[in-house]
Amino acid sequence: MSAAVAALLEILDLEPLERDLFRGRSPQSGWQRVFGGQVIGQALVAATRTVGADRPVHSLHGYFVRPGDPKVPIVYRVERIRDGGSFTTRHVEAIQHGAAIFSMEASFHRPEESLAHQVAGPTAPLPGTLADEATLKQQFLAEAPAGVRAYFEHERPIELRPVDLEHYFSRRRLDPFQQVWMRSTGPLPDDPAIHAAVLAYASDMTLLDTALFAHGRSVFDPTLQLASLDHAMWFHRPLRVDDWLLYTQDSPISGGGRGFCRGAIHTASGELVASTAQEGLIRRRSARPDPA
């Protein structure tokens, strides 16, 4: 297991404080805000700790209320909304400095037989045909902007292999669509709840950036203020994040200081395992430099 994966699993292993009350920490990596995917993943872990293992998560809907402070712990308070015959509902608040920074509803469902269908999955070059991160660093990062270099140079728990790299090295306006292969940089335990939490963590990566393709911008642009405003996720099938997953994303609209993005996550064999949707803040800093 890589050191970065071990560190991620440690961050997702919340400390129990009291019944339905947990504490999480953030990596001390120098970021000014807590990464949104971390808060989603930790909130899902908190909710899952109050649900039987026979009911995996099938959906979550969360709102980012305030920026997270990485220097202090995050307290997660779980409210048991309902325990039904098939479905279980939980509400989670992530709290820092006495105020909520994130609010989430999560629903868990006992597996059952039912009608089933799936439309054909997308096509994309297989990850083995794409440049891995070591090759990317060697061939491209020397000429890359400082923000891109900083993002790719440090060890990370999730490996990303974009199908097309033009967005990272060009200001050309592109269709607001991208495909990114992703997987953990080391094996994960067999616990399905851990794979769900790690996928929730990874699902916040690259998603809002899709809205910027149409404008020739990226998340590394210092003239933009960017932040996730909400995040929704649906888990359709059991999955493994230490196997390659294809994250197909598009952004049908942006405006009014917000960008809307959608994602579909497939296995290498084309099975749809999860779907995402997110709206994020996209604001020119010169227009209003104050925090959201």
Image: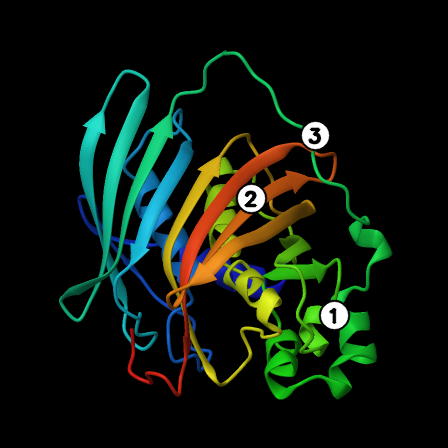
Q: CA distance from mark 3 to mark 1?
A: 27 Å
Q: Is residue 86 left or right of residue 11?
A: left
Identify residue type, mark 3: Ala
Tell me: residue 113, above or below residue 230. above
* Residue situated in front as seen by the camera: 280 or 8: 280
Question: In this orientation, which residue lies closer to the viewer: 134 or 228?
Answer: 228
What's the residue type where badge 2 is placed?
Answer: Pro
Image mark for residue 166 = 1
258 displayed left or right of 87: right
**Splitting the image into 4 quarters, where does residue 39 fall?**
bottom left
> Which image quarter: residue 215?
bottom right
Classify mark 3: helix, strand or loop.
loop
- Determine the secondary structure under disc 1: helix
User: SS of the residue at dot 2?
Assistant: loop
Q: Residues within 10 Å of mark 3 (few under 14, many from 20)?
A: few
Q: Which residue is mark 3?
A: 120
Judge whether 169 appears above or below 255 on screen: below
Q: Quadrant of the C terminus?
A: bottom left
Q: Nearer the viewer, residue 44 or 119?
A: 119
Q: What is the crowding at mark 1: few (fewer than 14 residues within 10 Å), some, or many (at least 20)?
A: few
Above or below for 230 versus 67: above
Q: Is residue 162 left or right of residue 32?
A: right
Position of residue 34 measured from the top left corner of the image (x, y, whole percent): 38, 70
